[in-house]
């Protein structure tokens, strides 16, 4: 019996292109199937955007599935471990130099069988209770003490505490490219000048000056914001989210640090400013910084001033890279025989590191949905439904960070305006005034963030859930208090047992310990 020949052409490299290639090669067992061909067409003249260098914990499962050794990944991408995000000055404008912060950990809140601690925390005295993440997890204090989430002797990709990574995007793309080629992916260098369509409106071929005409059964657009295939050739329009998410610019830079002297944070630091926020990411030997802002509320020169002031001494002469973006996504990300992955499908903003997790979600579905025979557009409707829902849910989650703020600058006041809050989010906020977020608020197949992620942001920002009318229903106060105390004892133990983040990175990369 003959097997149908299938050719997949991924146009564009970078993290999106090479992660897609490596994942498909592994999932579709490329090395065992002579009838299947996966090719990456990469332009040598177009650089990698690499917006944001943070990830979501799902990346550990992805890297493990691909067969990439964790120590090698950490060593070759200058990676560090990320346990969550520290949000500085998001809830209130700092007064007199006094900053306040809250933590969004990757660990779920502690849960005992039959006893949910969240209502008991809500009923405690607001003036004396611990911050939400500190009261219900050990991860906040572990991260703030610059401890690691795991020990060197533990199996790769496993740990007592959940974690992701910070990494150098260019180095990750190189690592993924090498691994994909080892899995059997073909690598061609050339620039697409035109995509020709057939009578049905599907892509018939792409033309390059270096390689001539190339043809495939499925084209995957990883050309970034240019969206050469899905946008320019097929006309799939971007649905703007600018009326909800105002940020549309980023200024980014990278500063070298002395690895022997630097404090190595194991979380992203997100510091709010008058019209947006600043990311501060610690790599192994470098520090990545970026000022995210709304061009409607802040000029480029002022944004550069804010970033340089945050970066501190030595940043005055460092070149800043301007990254304009249009927050939004394509509702039709799979059109005919072309599917967009990465920035070509959409981008919202760097907050909460959703860029890479959207790539993971898309390529996982492609690997499962791509038909072995017949028309390649068969899965398009379902794929588009799922990705549209995922983007919309992420928009809601990102908006949550802004609309709850009590800051008084125009950017923040505009974000709190009811007309800018999506209807679904407004409905949930109204419910959450009388109960905390729960698992039935969300559908698992289209969510990136769980109900407890919403809890961390809500209660970190000072949102009030009034359970006073039902106080008498929560009768296990003594047991809850014992569990709260137990979490703090576990925390103290973890601070002793877990190594410093910098020591663990040195061990995993083979660098000498101090």
Image (cartoon, helix red, strand yellow):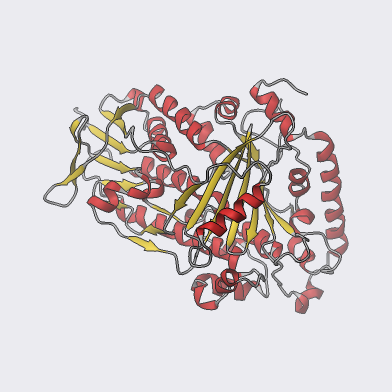
Q: Quadrant of residue 367?
A: top left
468 sits left or right of 427 in the view:
right
**Image point (45%, 29%), residue name:** 174
66 sits left or right of 228 in the view:
right
Q: Position of residue 483 (x, y in %)?
A: 83, 54
Furthest toward the front, the residue is 317
Q: Quadrant of residue 474?
A: bottom right
Q: Position of residue 240 (x, y in %)?
A: 40, 64
Using the image, determine if residue 365 lies above or below residue 109.
above
Q: Position of residue 266 (x, y in %)?
A: 69, 41
Quarter placement of the C terminus: top right
Using the image, determine if residue 153 lies above or below residue 427.
above
**Image point (76%, 38%), residue name:** 147
Quarter placement of the N terminus: top left
Q: Position of residue 49 (x, y in %)?
A: 44, 43
119 sits left or right of 10 in the view:
right
The front one of 111 and 100 is 100
**Image point (74%, 37%), residue name:** 263
The front one of 73 and 512 is 512
């Amino acid at each position: 019996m003959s097997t149908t020949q299938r050719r997949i052409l991924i146009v564009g490299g970078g993290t999106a292109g090479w992660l897609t290639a490596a994942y498909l090669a592994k999932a579709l067992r490329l090395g065992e199937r002579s009838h299947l061909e996966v090719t990456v067409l990469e332009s040598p003249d177009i650089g990698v955007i690499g917006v944001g260098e943070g990830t979501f914990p799902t990346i550990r499962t992805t890297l493990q599935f691909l067969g990439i050794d964790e120590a090698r990944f950490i060593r070759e991408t200058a990676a560090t471990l990320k346990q969550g995000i520290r949000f500085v000055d998001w809830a209130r404008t700092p007064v007199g130099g006094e900053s306040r912060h809250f933590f969004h950990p990757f660990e779920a809140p502690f849960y005992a069988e039959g006893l949910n601690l969240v209502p008991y925390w809500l009923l405690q005295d607001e003036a004396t209770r611990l911050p939400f993440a500190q009261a219900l997890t050990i991860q906040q204090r572990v991260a703030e003490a610059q401890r690691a989430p795991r020990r060197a002797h533990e199996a790769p990709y496993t740990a007592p505490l959940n974690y992701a990574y910070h990494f150098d995007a260019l180095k990750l793309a190189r690592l993924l490219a090498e691994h994909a080629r080892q899995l059997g992916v073909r690598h061609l260098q050339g620039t697409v000048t035109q995509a020709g369509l057939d009578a049905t409106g599907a892509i018939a071929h792409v033309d390059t000056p270096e390689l001539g005409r190339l043809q495939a059964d499925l084209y995957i657009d990883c050309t970034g914001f240019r969206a050469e295939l899905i946008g320019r050739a097929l006309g799939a329009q971007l649905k703007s989210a600018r009326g909800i998410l105002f940020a549309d610019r980023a200024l980014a830079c990278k500063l070298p640090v002395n690895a022997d002297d630097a404090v190595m944070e194991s979380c992203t630091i997100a510091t709010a400013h008058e019209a947006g926020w600043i990311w501060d990411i610690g790599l192994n030997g470098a520090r990545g910084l970026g000022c995210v802002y709304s061009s409607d509320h802040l000029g480029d020169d002022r944004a550069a001033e804010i970033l340089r002031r945050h970066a501190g001494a030595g940043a005055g002469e460092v070149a800043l890279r301007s990254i304009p973006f249009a927050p939004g996504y394509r509702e039709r990300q799979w059109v005919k025989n072309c599917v967009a992955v990465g920035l070509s499908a959409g981008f919202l903003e760097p907050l909460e590191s959703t860029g890479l997790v959207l790539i993971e979600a898309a390529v996982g579905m492609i690997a499962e949905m791509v038909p072995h025979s017949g028309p390649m557009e068969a899965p398009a409707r379902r794929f588009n439904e799922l990705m549209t829902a995922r983007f919309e849910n992420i928009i809601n989650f990102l908006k949550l960070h802004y609309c709850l703020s009590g800051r008084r600058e125009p950017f923040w006041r505009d974000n709190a305006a009811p007309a800018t809050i999506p209807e679904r989010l407004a409905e949930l906020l109204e419910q959450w005034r009388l109960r905390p977020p729960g698992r039935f608020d969300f559908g698992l197949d289209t969510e990136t963030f769980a109900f407890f992620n919403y809890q961390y942001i809500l209660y970190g920002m000072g949102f009030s859930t009034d359970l006073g009318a039902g106080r008498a229903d929560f009768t296990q106060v003594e047991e809850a208090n014992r569990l709260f105390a137990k979490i703090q004892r576990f925390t103290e133990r973890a601070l002793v047992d877990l190594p410093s983040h910098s020591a663990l990175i040195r061990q995993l990369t083979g660098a000498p310990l101090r």
